[in-house]
Image (cartoon, grey):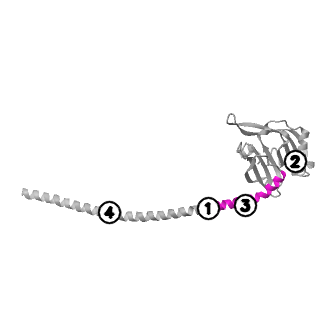
């Protein structure tokens, strides 16, 4: 009986072992089959992804080319729009040597559409807001020069013109850019005027402030109830001209030529 019992136990062990082996084999086979299916699906998916991304890579250069084309067309359109105003301005103004056109903006001044042109030194020296620049504003409707400003570090030194010299230079400028205007103006005062720019100190390699001074000839135009002025710097150079300035307990007209205003805008 004991032997039979031992045999039964051994048999059951063998039987269970066989069941385990069969079960393990079945699981292994099913696992391999599942892996095969997943792998096949994965391969197909990866192939599809490769096709999609491959196609995208083919499309991207084309998209970039189209965007470049659109940007170029827009730039050409804008350039065509402001070219007449710029051409007219350059007939009356002289761009200082060493300056190149850096920025053109479409803005509003006294609710009128204007172009704002900004020239800076081609060398890159003292570029940007508060730096050296030659800028002017032109009315889009009639290409009238509403003002210009020349901020250059060379005007931080030198003798300023007398009041009489300033008046003479102001008249010469106005007769050129706005014929007949000088006779209509009422001169309010003639006095010193200062502006500040930031330039690089080559010795210490840091930015320093310089005061640009000139003699200001400020006037009132009664028929339009606004103001105009001319500022003459060292050497008889006109460093600022503005007209059509509305004043009501302070300046109302936008100050597109003034970096201190632009910086805080």
Q: Nearer the viewer, residue 218 or 56?
A: 56
Mark 1 vs mark 4: which is more N-terminal? 4
Q: Which residue is mark 3?
A: 77
Q: Which residue is mark 1?
A: 65
**Residue 84 visible somewhere in the drawing:** yes
**Any mark on residue 32, and which?**
4
Q: Nearer the viewer, mark 4 or mark 2?
A: 2
Mark 1 vs mark 2: which is more N-terminal? 1
Secondary structure beneath dot 2 equals helix
Mark 2 vs mark 3: which is more N-terminal? 3
Q: Which residue is mark 2?
A: 173
- Crowd class of label 3 (few under 14; some 14 to 19; many from 20; radius 10 Å): few
Q: Which residues are magenta?
A: 66-92
Q: CA distance from mark 2 to mark 3?
A: 32 Å
Residue 217: percent from the left, percent from the top?
Answer: 87, 42
Q: Nearer the viewer, mark 3 or mark 4?
A: 3
Q: Pointers 3 and 1 in contact (CB under 8 A)?
A: no
Secondary structure beneath dot 3 equals helix
Q: Does residue 13 show up magenta in the picture? A: no
Dominant SS of magenta comes to helix
- Crowd class of label 1 (few under 14; some 14 to 19; many from 20; radius 10 Å): few
Mark 3 vs mark 4: which is more N-terminal? 4
**Any mark on residue 183, and which?**
none
Residue drawn at x 25%, y 62% as measured from the top left = 23
Mark 4 vs mark 2: which is more N-terminal? 4
Residue 116: percent from the left, percent from the top?
Answer: 76, 52
């Amino acid at each position: 009986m004991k032997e039979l019992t031992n045999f039964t136990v051994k048999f059951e062990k063998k039987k269970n072992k066989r069941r385990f082996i069969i079960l393990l084999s079945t699981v292994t086979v099913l696992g391999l089959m599942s892996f095969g299916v997943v792998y096949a699906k994965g391969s197909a998916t990866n192939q599809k992804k490769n096709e999609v991304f491959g196609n995208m890579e083919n499309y991207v250069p084309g998209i970039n080319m189209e965007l470049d084309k659109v940007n170029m067309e827009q730039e050409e359109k804008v350039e065509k729009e402001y070219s007449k105003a710029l051409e007219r301005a350059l007939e009356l103004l002289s761009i200082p040597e060493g300056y190149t056109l850096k920025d053109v903006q479409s803005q509003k001044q006294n609710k009128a559409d204007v172009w704002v042109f900004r020239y800076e030194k081609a060398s890159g020296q003292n570029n940007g807001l508060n730096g050296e620049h030659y800028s002017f504003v032109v009315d889009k409707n009639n290409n009238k020069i509403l003002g210009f400003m020349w901020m250059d570090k060379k005007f931080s030194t030198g003798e300023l013109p007398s009041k009489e010299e300033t008046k003479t230079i102001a008249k010469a400028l106005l007769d050129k850019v706005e014929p007949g205007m000088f006779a209509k103006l009422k001169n309010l005062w003639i006095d010193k005027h200062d502006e500040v720019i930031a330039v690089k100190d080559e010795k210490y390699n840091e930015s320093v402030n310089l005061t640009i001074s000139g003699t200001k000839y400020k006037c009132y135009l009664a028929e339009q109830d606004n103001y105009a002025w001319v500022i003459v710097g060292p050497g008889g150079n006109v460093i600022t001209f503005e007209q059509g300035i509305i004043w009501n307990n302070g300046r109302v007209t936008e100050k597109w030529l003034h970096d201190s205003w632009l910086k805080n805008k």
